[in-house]
Image (spheres, grey):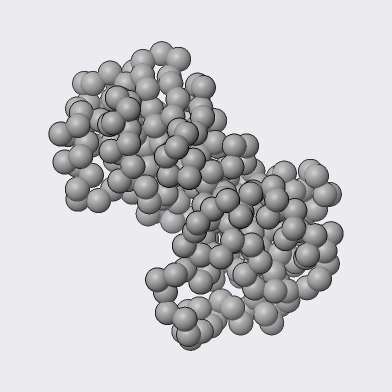
Amino acid sequence: MTRTELSQYLAEYLQVANFKDYAPNGLQVEGKKEIGTIVTGVTACQALIDEAIKLDADAILVHHGFFWKSEAEVIVGMKQKRIKALLVNDINLYGYHLPLDAHPDVGNNAQLGKVLGIDNARAIEGQAQGLIWRGELSVPVLAKELTQAISHTLSRECLHLGDESSLVETIAWCTGGAQDYIDVAASLGIDAFISGEASERTYHCAVEQNVQYYGAGHHATELYGIQALGKHLATKFGLTHHFVDISNPV
């Protein structure tokens, strides 16, 4: 398929126009016109770009791309090296941030719910552009048991803030750096909230509102959406797809 066809399909499939975001969603760096091989990864870091070059990729699709609203506009240093590598090798870079978090099938939240085995997973309507999800466990567990289960499933030690002896049945979550949405979970009477990171204030929010908080890793919670998107494109359009996981402890 062509670069333009892929851009148009993803804009519609991910409903890009529905989101107010912190970076451009879609084609961020233009490469070759025809696309047959795609590489997916969480973040458009140099290591991912280098692997894509080795795999002779025509396009890279990521969740964390370039040109965030708070970053410097000049193309120097690390940013220059990354962009130069893409341009020299004629590789397209596509980035999809909030649209990939929210998608009902291939989205980060939908996929994390599946991976963790949460029942009746769905977005909470009217909250944060549909980015906060909720669901239930088929069997309630102790908070400390849920910590162990998340750590085992995501292959990363999960931070738990709260009472280990509390019983957890209802769960809300939002992947990545969404720790402050714990207050939404508390307002809805939900037992636990999962995100990627924790701030100093998160501890107090969890303890004072009796919500079990789980910081499962920004990278670890957002591994699954971009993989699912790549598999979807490969199946639908016959593209060759490689997912490359650049390990990140954060």
Residue 188 in the figure: left or right of residue 229: left
Q: Position of residue 127 (x, y in %)?
A: 42, 39
Residue occupying image coordinates x 45% and y 25%: 135
Q: How many marks?
A: 0
Which quadrant of the view contains residue 248?
Answer: bottom left
Residue occupying image coordinates x 61% and y 54%: 16
Q: The C terminus appears in which quarter of the rendering?
A: bottom left
Residue 163 in the figure: left or right of residue 12: left
Q: Is residue 41 visible?
A: no
Residue 95 in the figure: left or right of residue 35: left
Residue occupying image coordinates x 72% and y 44%: 232
Q: Position of residue 12 (x, y in %)?
A: 70, 51
Q: The N terminus appears in which quarter of the rendering?
A: bottom right
Residue occupying image coordinates x 84% and y 49%: 238
Which quadrant of the view contains residue 41?
Answer: bottom right
Q: Is residue 190 above or below residue 154?
A: above
Of residues 214 and 26, the one drawn nearer to the viewer in this rendering:
26
Which quadrant of the view contains residue 203?
Answer: top left
Q: Is residue 180 visible?
A: yes
Q: Position of residue 115 (x, y in %)?
A: 52, 32
Q: Position of residue 228 (x, y in %)?
A: 64, 43
Q: Residue furthest top?
A: 139
Residue 217 in the figure: left or right of residue 81: left
Q: Is residue 28 above or below residue 42?
A: below
